[in-house]
Image (tube, rainbow, N blue to C red):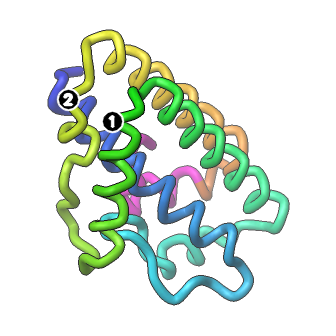
Amino acid sequence: MTLKVVIRTASRLLLVSIGVGTLLITTPPLALGQPAGAPNREAIRSLNLSRSQMRQLRSIVQGYQSSLEGILTSSQRQQLEDLQAAQLDQPASDSPPDLVAQLNLSADQQSQLETIQASMAEELKTVLSPEQFEQAQQLGFPGL
């Protein structure tokens, strides 16, 4: 996997984690807004997640966000917060910006990010049924 693909996937996973986290934390009812690049509410609803799955996904997302923040320097964390805040004001896009690419990660940070990504994807596989996982892949959920 090329570095560009890893960074693009990480950026999308970050946006998904923000979007899914926002949606799961506010469900029910779903939040009115969501970050740009996050899967839309209809896509998430179409997975027909149980309450238990929503709780598990919330936990996975929070763990991913904590892990990501753990590999960033304080200035990178601040930059990420600023970028995320700016994304909240933008309309959804099929091609979200590479937030992670803008953080200028070191090679070690990129390696750690790849490990976190793989772990998150594996955890998602254990929460979703095979049908839900396949549907999530078809809907274009990054990292799946």
Residue found at the very far right of the displayed protein: 52
Q: In the image, what residue occupies the spot 59% across and 72% down?
A: 23
Q: Nearer the viewer, residue 40 or 31?
A: 31
- What range is drawn magenta here? 133-144
Residue 102, by quadrant, is top left
Q: Nearer the viewer, residue 101 or 39?
A: 101
- In the rendered structure, the answer to whether residue 45 lies left or right of residue 89 reads right
Q: Is residue 112 magenta?
A: no
Q: Which residue is mark 2?
A: 104
Mark 2 and mark 1 in contact (Cβ < 8 Å)?
Answer: yes
Image disc number at residue 76 = 1
- In the rendered structure, the answer to whether residue 70 lies left or right of residue 51 reads left
In the depicted structure, whether residue 124 falls above or below residue 96: above
Local packing at callout 2 (Cα closer than 10 Å; few below 14, some 14-19, many 20+) is: few
Number of marks in picture: 2
Q: Is residue 143 magenta?
A: yes
Q: In the image, what residue occupies the spot 23% across and 21% down?
A: 1
- The amino acid sitting under disc 2 is Asn
Q: In the image, what residue occupies the spot 53% across and 36% down?
A: 121
Q: Secondary structure at mark 1?
A: helix
In the depicted structure, whether residue 92 falls above or below residue 17: below
